[in-house]
Image: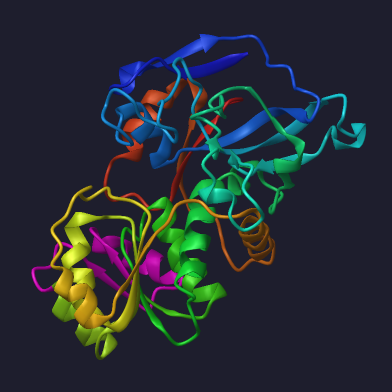
Amino acid sequence: MKAVQVTGYGDVDKLEVVEKSVPEPKSNEVLIKVKACAINNTEIWMREGAYGSGTKSGWKPEGVQFPRIPGSDITGTIVKAGNQVEESMIGKDVVLFPFTSSGKEGFEHISEDMSFIGSEYDGGYAEYVVWPVDLCFDMPLPDYIESSVFSVSGLTAWHMVEQIQAKPGETIIVTGANGGVGSLNVQIASKVFGAKVIAIVGDLTLKERIQELGAAHVLSYKSENLAEEILEVNGGPVDSVLDVVGDALFSTSLQVLKNGGKFCISGSAGGQQTELDFRTLYLKHITLYGSVLGTRAEFKRMLDAISEGKIKPVIERTFPLEKAREAQTFFKNSGKLGKIVLLPEE
C-alpha cells in the first residue's frame, strides 16, 4: 500500500511517501480501507517535537517510535476482520475513535496508558489502517470526507464545552474560531448547548462565515482594544473562554472573564508559556481547565449531534495523500476556515 511516514523530528521533509505491506488485523481488529484522513495540529506538533523536548515527543514519555504513519481523523470501509470479529462488520463505513485506553468509562482520556493513532500506532496517512473493532463507529454522515473532520477536533471541542458546563444564555468566547477545534467550538457551544458565542479570529473577511456557524459576534485578535470590544458587545464580562491559542490571548481572556468565570484550554498555537499573576485567579474565583480529546460517551453524543444536523463539517480544501507535505504546509497558513483533508484514492 501507499503510505506517508514521518521519519523523525523536523520539518515537512521528514514526511516521505513509501510503499508498505498492508497491515494484518489482530483477533479483535479490523482492516479499514482509508477513504479520507483530515489533518490535525497533533500530527504536525508530533513531527516538530512540540509535545516534548525535541528529542522525545508524543503522547507518552518515551516519545514517538519512528518511522510512524501519522493521521488520526479517519473514515473508511472495513474490508477484513480479525478472527474474533463478526464477519458482518465487513463492508461497514466507519469513523475511528482516535485512541486506546484501559481507563474506566468516563476517564479514558486521562488514563496513563492512553495511546493515540498516528502517534503510538500507525495512522491514516495510508491506503489501509488496522484498528480495534470496538473503536469503529458508524459514520455520522453519508460522505467520507465530511465525516472525517470531527474525530479529534470535534471530540476535543465537545469535551471542552461539556467541561465548562455551558448553559443556554451564557456568553462564551471562542479563540481561533476559524480553525478545526475553534470552528467546532462555535457550533457546539451555540447550536447544541444554546450559548451566545463571541468568536475571535485574525481575518475579519471570515466574519459572515463564522456567524453562519453560530457566532453572535466576530472580533479580531489584531485589535489594540480587544478586551474593551468584548466587554462592549457583550454588555459586560463573559462566562467562559474556550481557548486554543495560549499565551497571545491569555491575559485578555482573564481580563474579560466574570467573577467565577471558567477558562478552558486545549492548544497553544499562540505561545506555550505565559506569565500569570495568581491574584487574578483567586480574586476573580476563576476556574482553569486543561483539555484534550474526551470520552467514548462524548464521542457518541457528538456523532448523534452531527447526524441530527446540529454540527456541520467545515472544510477548507482536500489534497491527495502523496501531497502530505504541501497539505501540512497549507494547514499552517492563516486565514483558512475549517479542516484540510487527505485523500488516499485521489
Q: Residue at x 86, y 32 (%)?
A: 85
- Apparent side of residue 278 relative to residue 165 in the rendered image (left or right): left
Tell me which residue sits at (34%, 51%) in the image: 267
Q: Quadrant of the C terminus?
A: top right
Residue 181: x, y in percent? Answer: 43, 55
- Kindly identify the residue that appears in the image at 17 percent across and 69 percent down: 278
Foreground pick, 79 / 276: 276
Asked whether 46 falls inside the magenta stretch, the response is no
| 113 in relation to 296, above or below | above
Up-down: is 195 above or below 121?
Answer: below
- Looking at the rendering, the stretch of residues picked out in magenta corresponds to 198-225
Look at the image and tell me whether residue 333 can be seen: yes
Residue 223 painted magenta: yes
Side of 133 relative to 54 (left or right): right
Task: State whether residue 17 is above or below residue 147.
Answer: above
Relative placement, left or right, of 219 versus 41 is left
At which x and y percent is residue 37?
A: 55, 35
